[in-house]
Image (tube, coloured by chain):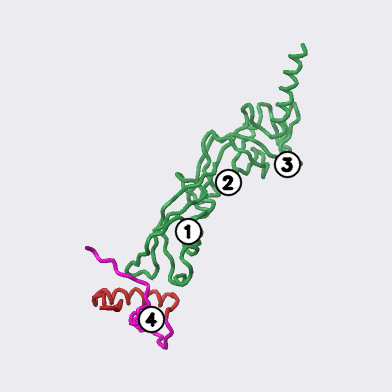
Amino acid sequence: MTEKRDKYTKYEKARIIGARALQIAAGAPVLIRTEEIDPIEIAMEEFESGNIPITVKRKK
Amino acid sequence: MYTKIRAIDVVRVPPERLGDELRPTVKEVLQDNLEGRMDKKIGMVIAILDVVDMKEGRIIIGDSGVYYETVFDMLVFKPKMQEIVEGEVVEIVAFGAFVAIGPLDGLLHISQITDEYISYDEKGEKLVTKDTGKTLGEGDKLRARIVAISLNEMDPGDSKIGLTMRQPGLGKLEWIEEEREKEKKGEQEKINR
């Protein structure tokens, strides 16, 4: 549980990758060097590398 | 009257701007959204001065933009009833003169220029008084009071501001100066006597 991505549930992961993929599809700059073309694939790769600047606010 | 106002607004930063520095981007978006806008309560927004504070961004489902709640300072112009303004004549027409008072123009109707009878000189594009021959033309600077305001939010340029100069201390700056000289002379004569 040291890596950032392990903190998220699968639902949170889906939400983050979804939001990030939409941003990339709409023209946001990509944060990693990648061969991928599909925004969803790019977003997943960014997520795996821990580069997505999105956090989850949980209700207490 | 110009005022500096602190306001709060939610700003959408579009995805293609996400790579840029945040504060300047937010300021730019605010400028695009608000500058030149008219609000009956606030007045006309002249400029966004400074982004004071920003909260964390929020991502909404189905929207690729990021929303930031922002506190910022802006410069606004709001004409106030009975306010004294100084301006320059920008156009003379048959029914009066249009006077630039900041970002908006006010209308000075011929009946509100002097106590004298005044008429429109078509050739010279000037307004001339009957007895003393005072003239009012384009480019003349004057001091007037705001007596009517009707702001149009949809089309700021269509807003109407009514002015008057038929009060002591108001008029073309040269007239005011003359009036003051006359008064000084009068007092001098009183003392001499």
| Mark 2, secondary structure of its residue | strand
Question: Disc 1 versus disc 2: distance between alpha carbons?
Answer: 22 Å
Task: Name the magenta segment's main secondary structure.
Answer: loop
Residue A50 shown in magenta: yes
Mark number, residue A39: 4
Chain under disc 4: A
Q: Which residue is mark 3?
A: B125
Q: Which residue is mark 1?
A: B30
Question: Disc 4 versus disc 2: distance between alpha carbons?
Answer: 48 Å
For chain A, the rendered hue is red
Give the amino acid type for the residue marked by disc 1 in the picture. Leu
- Mark 3 or mark 2, which has the lower sequence index? 2
Have a look at marks 3 and 2 and say if they share a chain: yes
- Mark 1 or mark 3, which has the lower sequence index? 1
Relative to residue B130, is residue B50 depicted above or below? Answer: below
**What is the residue that sits farthest to the left in this orientation?**
A60
Residue A6 shown in magenta: no
Q: Which segment did they paint magenta?
A: A32-60
Q: Residue at x 43, y 84 (%)?
A: A33
**What is the residue that sits farthest to the right in this orientation?**
B192
Mark number, residue B142: none
**What is the residue that sits farthest to the bottom in this orientation?**
A35
Relative to residue B2, is residue B187 depicted above or below? Answer: above
Quadrant where the image shows the N terminus of chain B: top right
